[in-house]
Image (cartoon, coloured by chain):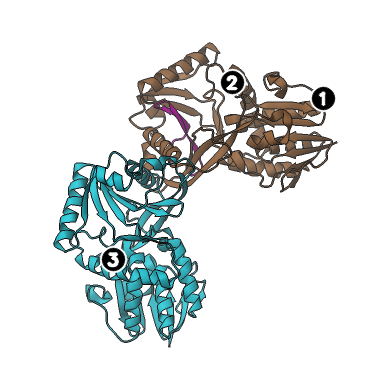
Chain colours: A brown, B cyan
């Protein structure tokens, strides 16, 4: 049986790899594999700290997927899985109230997190600045080096027999087509029209420099005057993200977006002033109407796995599991079924 | 007669071109011509607004060179010479006092400039923000597109017979050697040791985006809480610079440097928030002990033209004129003689 996968980001590569392992002859098309939002991403595997009230189904999917991650990473030969955990920091009163309600919400769901004062947080993470007045510790939220992951996934997929064609998918015939084209997916099937849209996110990559304050050991998330910001550790630097705006297929970083990220990140971890700014980029998250992915069957010959918004890397192992089940004739949870919008 | 030029930035290319026109057989060595600080530069041709008290000799050199610029640019087929003039803006009281003393100083030198209120400046340049409280208009200070200039210079040099070798100069024999290696010059001759040092400058390139506030028509310079910042117009964007720090041969932009530039530039021209941030870079100005260039003879077979600090592009036509005079057996003004440090 032949499967054509359109899209070579983290979702397309993971699904192609797992389908090949399940016995499918897989061809993957992408003019530039390992790029797009997967390349720009921060790589947080953070179901808990992404779990805002009203998004319980996303939390459940995230928890199922993060549980798959350690074995998934081990199979890939460890693509930079970072298990140091996450702290969430707040500065002003409004931001602290917001984190309090997140903690309450998680407690009600039976996912208690540890509330800490600013001083306690700084004891855990001396890189946090004096403006941090309180927050949470969430040891279970992980991160992964998204670029190392992409390279590992491509190697694993090719080793499993996936044939990668570095060109755009243009209706090549196949028994089955799987659309994993991220924010560009809507153009590939009429049923996706209006359901997947690009959500721009700007991100920075910093390099630690000799003499600069040591890096935080954990992922640091924060709310600064209501704006979310995160700093994710990498072997010798930090990924700082991410803005969120809807401006069509626009991947040019703006002065205002970069200024916000620098200002907010520096307020939380002042020592980054001495770090190198080695990359400024923007990516397009594939947004969906309800912030949940679209995973499943569109018609007799077409499947889809997209619309993962901020959670594509987290949800990759679960998404591939669901796609392989659908290829086997199974079904998906109603929450992710692409037909749910009627 | 054979001349070897070590360095293919704006000074090396200009001197090589003029020497070839004067009848020399010129070979120019640079592993990466048209790069370095010439590539990163803002391209201001601004003798007046760079003329701080105590730097009268630099002002005089700058005025001599800026007078050569229109014909120089015309010979090169117009490499983006921008004749819209310059405004200098100040925000706080200290910055305004500093500009007042610059204006007094220029008046004493017989170079009067026009003092304007914030409102008058905004009438000239509606892009200036409400924090601008006063400043100067300096119509005679020009700018040039440094990258277009480099391309034009290379074309002109090659057309005049200059042979460009894209590799480092390694003591190739020649009748005469001319050292134009910018911040790297000190390594090429013992007499330059300790006289030329790298002065790092970070710079940003912005692109105007549809819907964003129109660009300023003039070069905008400003003092913001004592920090100088400039915004130089390009055909569809702005060059924003420049920080100044001494960290050896380090060309990695830092978070703190970029943050300062963004903050200060946005304070003066708030509309840039909606512009694209398309490039972040750092270059190494060739600093000299007295902020004046080193132009002239080092020994029987060696000439030098470097140490131009922030003024290399401005001083290029004059520098080449002086070098051709020295090649002809002439002398240079004492202020630029490389032997002046005795």
- Determine the CA span between mark 3 and mark 1: 75 Å
Q: Chain of mark 3?
A: B
**In the figure, residue B60 lies in which quadrant?**
bottom left
In this rendered view, identify the residue nearer to me: B59 or B191: B59
Q: Chain of mark 2?
A: A
Residue B116 position in % (x across, y down): 22, 48
**In the figure, residue B5 lies in which quadrant?**
bottom left
- Determine the CA span between mark 2 and mark 1: 26 Å
Residue A47 position in % (x across, y down): 57, 24
A74 left or right of B105? right
B325 left or right of A31? left
Residue B288's mark?
3
Residue B287's mark?
none
Q: Which residue is mark 1?
A: A329
Circle 3 residues within 10 Å: few <14, some 14–19, many ≥20: many
Asked if residue A213 is among those painted magenta in the image, a careful observer would answer yes
Judge if badges 3 and 1 mark residues of a common chain.
Answer: no
Task: State which quarter of the image contains the C terminus of chain B.
Answer: bottom left
Spot the residue most to the top: A108
Q: Is residue B185 above or below residue A130?
A: below
Residue B71 position in % (x across, y down): 37, 72
In this rendered view, identify the residue nearer to me: B259 or B211: B211
Q: Secondary structure at mark 2?
A: helix
Identify the residue at image location x=60%, y=24%: A291
The residues colored magenta run: A212-236
First in sequence: mark 2 vs mark 1: 2
Residue A321 visible = no
Q: Which residue is mark 2?
A: A59
Circle 1 residues within 10 Å: few <14, some 14–19, many ≥20: few
- C-beta proximity under 8 Å, tags 2 and 3: no
Identify the residue at image location x=68%, y=33%: A186
């Amino acid at each position: 049986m032949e499967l054509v996968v359109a899209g070579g980001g983290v979702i397309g590569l993971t699904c192609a790899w797992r389908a090949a392992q399940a016995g499918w002859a897989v061809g993957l098309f992408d003019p530039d594999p390992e790029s797009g939002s997967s390349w720009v991403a921060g790589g947080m595997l953070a179901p808990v700290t992404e779990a805002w009230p009203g998004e319980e189904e996303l939390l459940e999917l995230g928890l199922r997927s993060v549980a798959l991650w350690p074995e998934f990473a081990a199979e890939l030969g460890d693509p930079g899985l970072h298990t140091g955990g996450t702290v969430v920091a707040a500065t002003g009163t409004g931001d602290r109230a917001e984190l309090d309600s997140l903690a309450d919400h998680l407690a009600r769901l039976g996912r208690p997190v540890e509330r800490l004062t600013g001083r306690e947080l700084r004891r855990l993470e001396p890189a946090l600045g004096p403006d941090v007045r309180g927050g949470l510790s969430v040891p279970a939220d992980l991160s992964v080096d998204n670029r190392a992951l992409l390279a590992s996934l491509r190697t694993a997929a090719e080793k499993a027999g996936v044939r990668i064609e570095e060109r755009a998918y243009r209706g090549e015939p196949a028994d089955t087509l799987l659309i994993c084209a991220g924010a560009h997916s809507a153009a590939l099937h009429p049923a996706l029209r209006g359901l997947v849209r690009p959500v721009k996110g700007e991100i920075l990559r910093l390099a630690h420099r000799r003499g600069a304050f040591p890096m935080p050991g954990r992922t640091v998330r924060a709310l600064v005057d209501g704006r979310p910001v995160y700093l994710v550790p990498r072997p010798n630097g930090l990924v700082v993200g991410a803005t969120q705006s809807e401006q069509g297929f626009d991947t040019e970083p703006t002065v205002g977006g970069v200024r916000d990220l620098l200002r907010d990140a520096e307020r939380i971890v002042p020592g980054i002033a001495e770090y190198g700014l080695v990359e400024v980029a923007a990516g397009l998250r594939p947004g969906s109407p309800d912030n949940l992915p679209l995973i499943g069957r569109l018609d007799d010959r077409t499947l889809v796995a997209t619309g993962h918004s901020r959670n594509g890397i987290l949800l990759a192992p679960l998404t591939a599991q669901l796609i392989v089940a659908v290829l086997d004739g199974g079904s998906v949870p109603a929450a992710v079924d692409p037909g749910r919008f009627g």
